[in-house]
Amino acid sequence: MAMPEAMEGREAGDLLERARTVVDPQLRASVASLPGSMRRVAMYHFGWEHADGTPAGGQSGKAIRPALVLAAATALGGRPEAAVRAAAAVELVHNFTLLHDDVIDEDATRRHRPTAWTVFGTPDAIIVGDALFALALRLIADDGHPASGAASARIAACVIELCAGQQADCAFEQRGPQDVSLDECIAMAMAKTGALLGCACALGALYAGAGDEEVAAMDAFGREAGLAFQLIDDLIGIWGDPGRTGKPAGADLAAHKKSLPVVAALNSGTPAAAELAELYGGPMGAEAVRRAADAVDRAGGRDWAQVHAADRMARAVDHLSRAVPDLTAAGELLALAEFVTRRTR
Amino acid sequence: MAMPEAMEGREAGDLLERARTVVDPQLRASVASLPGSMRRVAMYHFGWEHADGTPAGGQSGKAIRPALVLAAATALGGRPEAAVRAAAAVELVHNFTLLHDDVIDEDATRRHRPTAWTVFGTPDAIIVGDALFALALRLIADDGHPASGAASARIAACVIELCAGQQADCAFEQRGPQDVSLDECIAMAMAKTGALLGCACALGALYAGAGDEEVAAMDAFGREAGLAFQLIDDLIGIWGDPGRTGKPAGADLAAHKKSLPVVAALNSGTPAAAELAELYGGPMGAEAVRRAADAVDRAGGRDWAQVHAADRMARAVDHLSRAVPDLTAAGELLALAEFVTRRTR
């Protein structure tokens, strides 16, 4: 990883762009196969249509997961084209969980737009989430690839883990500010975010015809990179630029969210931790949000998250080198992993 | 079907009992593999535990769908044991949709008990529903049977249809009493109920190693039997005995539900239809429910449902005879189909 940062960023940007170009048609064809009124909700959620059904030019997300599938397949000597359906399936699973999570968390905004449940109602958001999961399953089951069965099993296990992570996240919100340990919080993030990035990489490996050990190492790479990704995401949730994130400043703090930097700060035993706990015990207006962000910083939560993200990335590269001994073949994966842990939105 | 009615009922009862005996351990093992707090919600939903986590002796449902999987496999010369995982998967899919439907419809009671979302909250009911779908997928993907891929694809297509049916059902509730045609309502019931019974029979055929035509014919059998089943279920929803249904008398009418007999009545062009439409336009207290039930009857909705159920059963048998030319081999399937259209709860 001696590449200059700017070049990495550009390379990753190109990879994401390419993944979108290759995977979007598959994704759109899948969604287009849904019956009318479900299709409309899905098209809106993906940013392809406005609420009234007119076309929208929006992107359906950063395409990090599909790009990981394709890059993992490439790193193991596979043809990325063979993994396009798997890449689309992973993106469908991701979006199924987004639709449900937004209902569960009562989140009103995603990708700068009102969430689907606020526009179409909770029933439609639940139903269309279910349907996207089924579409993912169908893409994999229908593709006739020898890895199809193993891929289905991995997606199933991954969704169970995503569910466990989401449930733990909800449970944490019910607990007092200092009643969630950092270990619990890391385990939750690993289940909620790491599992799907690991699954994406493992699927790429499977579709490249890799053996069990390489698939497992790829999964571990994706998981560690996923945790780094979540740490950065959590920092953005506190200090991100609202113009770029599409969410209000300090949105996660305003929602009393027990994100990783917050929990690290709360568990720091510093005076700032006590201050943060007290703030989190009350309503979070703009001034409280500003003070809480400052307290997380002073309690060391911000630094910890940055250092821990780097540590997780190091572990990720370690796992990767087991799957791909000559890391030059894994340039795309490394560029993507570096990108997601350096982005600012 | 020259069997005396009582004997059929007994035979079907035995088949359901046997299906439960064979499939329950698989189902319980699947649910037991869930992480702790999801497991608890699932155990409650299946009636195996009380809300406080103590064991409950309740049955997890009538096991009609698993029994159909096993009977279809048997009818096509397969070993039912080979289809046990598929049978458990279908039951998991069924219960995943029940968990979500209860949230969506805000139903407070199922199988004589408070629904899972009323006990554990909406987030847990959504999450655990998702997890049950993933468990079903995993059971099929992991079973190493040659039919596994085709079975996954069928389950995926079926879930998309179930979603479409549920969405149509919700949409109908928003429309005026006379704005839903009988054809629309039948299509909705076919998607919401017929599809999964068809899928159950098709999976049984697949696991017996049947060819495409036999699988398709089995699917068609299950769908038609499923529609008959729904028609009877709708009659029970109006005239069923609360002591046996576990729901208040006329529950479907009280909820302004546009079930098949109601829609048939509303579209009958009779004076009773107008009366029913007027009742459905207002709040439904006990007296209104009684008068609405009477109006459905006088408008011919009750008779229509009974005659139409018999007609659908005849079509079902027609399809079945394409899959199993010598119907004596399909005795179990016929007994089950007869049973579900003759039951009174």
Image: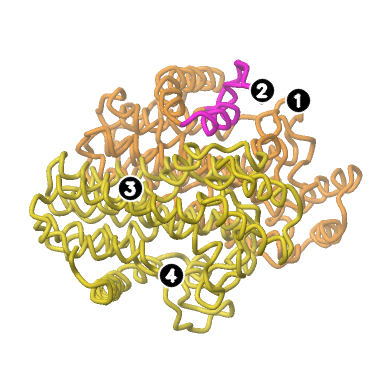
Chain colours: A yellow, B orange
Q: CA distance from mark 2 to mark 3?
A: 35 Å
Chain letter for mark 1: B
Earlier along the polypeptide chain: callout 1 or callout 2? 2
Q: Which residue is mark 3?
A: A223
Mark 4 on the same chain as mark 1: no
Q: Residue at coordinates 50% horizontally, 76% vertically from top-left?
A: A244
Q: Is residue B124 visible?
A: no
Give percent across and percent down for residue B126.
57, 45
Q: Which mark is residue A307?
A: none
Earlier along the polypeptide chain: callout 4 or callout 3? 3
Kind of element beneath mark 1: helix
Q: Up-down: is B85 above or below B216?
A: above
Are there few (<14), some (14-19), or many (20+) residues within 10 Å of tag 1? few
Mark 2 on the same chain as mark 3: no
* Camera-side mark, 4 or 2: 4
Mark 1 on the same chain as mark 2: yes
Kind of element beneath mark 3: helix
Confirm or deny contact between disc 1 and disc 3 (CB under 8 A). Answer: no
Q: Give the residue type that dot 4 points to.
A: Thr
**Side (left or right) of A95 relative to A102:** left
Give percent across and percent down for residue A14.
25, 76
Q: Which mark is residue A344?
A: 4
Q: Which residue is mark 1?
A: B243
Mark 1 on the same chain as mark 3: no
Q: Give the residue type that dot 1 points to.
A: Gly
On whether residue A73 falls in the magenta region, the answer is no
Who is closer to the viewer here, A314 or A165?
A314
Q: Which residue is mark 2?
A: B52
Q: CA distance from mark 4 to mark 3?
A: 20 Å
Kind of element beneath mark 2: loop
Chain letter for mark 2: B
